[in-house]
Amino acid sequence: MAKIPAPLRLDPDRLLPAAEAVRPVARRLYEAVRDLPIISPHGHVDPRMLRDDEPFADPAALLVQPDHYVTRILHAHGVPLDRLGVGEGPLPEQRAREVWRLLCTNWAAFRGTPVQYWLATELHDIFGVAERPDTADPDALYDQVAQRLREDAYRPRALLRRFGIRFLATTDDPADGLEAHAALAADPDVSTRIVPTFRPDRYLEPAGTGWADAVKRLGAVADADTGHYDGFVAALEARRRYFIEHGAVSTDHGHVDAVAAPLERADAGRIYARALAGEATPAEATAFRRHMILEMARMSCDDGLVMTLHPGVYRNHHPASLAAFGPDTGHDIPVAAEFTRALQPLLARYGTHPNLHLVLFTVDPSVYAREIAPLAGFYPAVYAGAPWWFLDNPAAIRGFQEAVTEIAGFARLSGFIDDTRAFCSIPARHDMSRRLDAGFLAGLVAEHRLDEDEALDTLTALVTTQPASVFKL
């Protein structure tokens, strides 16, 4: 028997507090910030997509294939990644339709997750979908979204304007020529400020595959001799300047730990030479990376780039998936993180430096109250990064609000970070954050800890002036 289609409902009060004494306040707060422009200081949208402004290929290529939040849950429910087209470009139509059918028929797998919230919001608000995917005809739904994607109003730049994105940072390799960013900056049709972010992880990890070749290429684009340590440091400094010239405001660091530990210059040079020769031990490679994190902070004090740090992830946990589909395909898994001892050498040197903004993110919620909030509550350089990745869900965000604000205060928060490759999820993610922040602040008003005007000022700042200040926009 065919399923009776069920409506795709988005309640206007979704995610707001259930308590009758709190919800009206939360509703007023949310309504005041709902339509404010989006500031996205950290994400993974491909700038070439916006430069070229070509129509999106199909619903699967837009909403499923590039979104590891979606594909990892489907994989957990027995759908192989190759059936989802992970790691491939646009698929032939029949394969794209099959990917879409897999999303629709497994819709129940997303219940209770923020992924369903984001997908439902995208389908309803952007594409006008009125039926829940698991009860709709998947092919008819595919056709509806595909028809929209053929319209000029659904090309990347049109959606960029529709989403109200004022500022968008991408994530970029230090050796990238940034041609797409230069083209976007020079294009009068693009009103959004789109900037690169300096992501040097692969150059700081001598144990990584292809490190020596990557360093050689870095030297070539920086016109520096990376055959020795001083030339390597000079190359990184030169590329940071190049990124700044193209609008960059921050650097991004995602190693397995947050440790920053200095080496003597001679020891750093010795390990670097051994690494180039392929002779560095794992311990030496780790020591070099920890030393270079300190050097990255020193460079930020010199050139003003904001430093974002998000350790504590076991990258590429499933070797077979890495080999078949590459990195960033859903099998990175959180591990415990530690910041207080790890960052003490860095903060002893630079924690009060006026040029350093250090934003600390984590996927280990146990460190919010114990470490990140106290660090942000003392050091002028430190800010508490918003819940990120596995923690960008309602329960974890509410826990973050409780854990951090009473220790560090709202003014030490980064503002929301969407951290996404899924372009159409950006407004849904920011909307979720605004609703949850409105609910939390409404609770403080109901408890008579804040007046409503204070709550509104705080919420407006979290959406607008806070990320602009933290990321030096």
Image (cartoon, grey):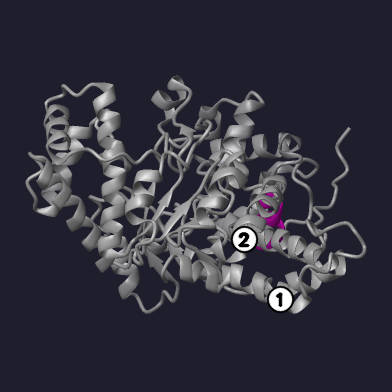
Q: Is residue 441 above or below residue 105?
A: below
Q: Residues within 10 Å of mark 1 (few under 14, many from 20)?
A: few
* Magenta highlight range: 118-128
Which image quadrant: the N terminus? top right
The amino acid pointed to by label 2 is His
Left or right of 6? Residue 307 is: left
**Res. 385 in view:** yes
The amino acid pointed to by label 1 is Glu
Left or right of 168? Residue 215 is: left
Q: Is residue 38 above or below residue 369?
A: below
Residue 226 x, y percent position in the rendering: 10, 43
Residue farthest along the right direction in this orientation: 20
Q: Residue at x 36, y 50 (%)?
A: 348
Residue 138 x, y percent position in the rendering: 71, 42
Q: Residue at x 61, y 41 (%)?
A: 365
Between marks 2 and 1 in the image, the one whose residue lies nearer the viewer: 1
**Res. 208 in view:** no
Closest to the observer, 27 or 255: 255
Q: Is residue 100 magenta?
A: no
Residue 172 x, y percent position in the rendering: 33, 52
Q: Is residue 356 above or below residue 60?
A: below
Residue 170 x, y percent position in the rendering: 40, 57
Which of the 4 image quadrants contains residue 239?
bottom left
Q: Main secondary structure of the magenta part?
A: helix
- Tag of residue 454: 1
Residue on which disc 2 sits: 430
Left or right of 140? Residue 425 is: left
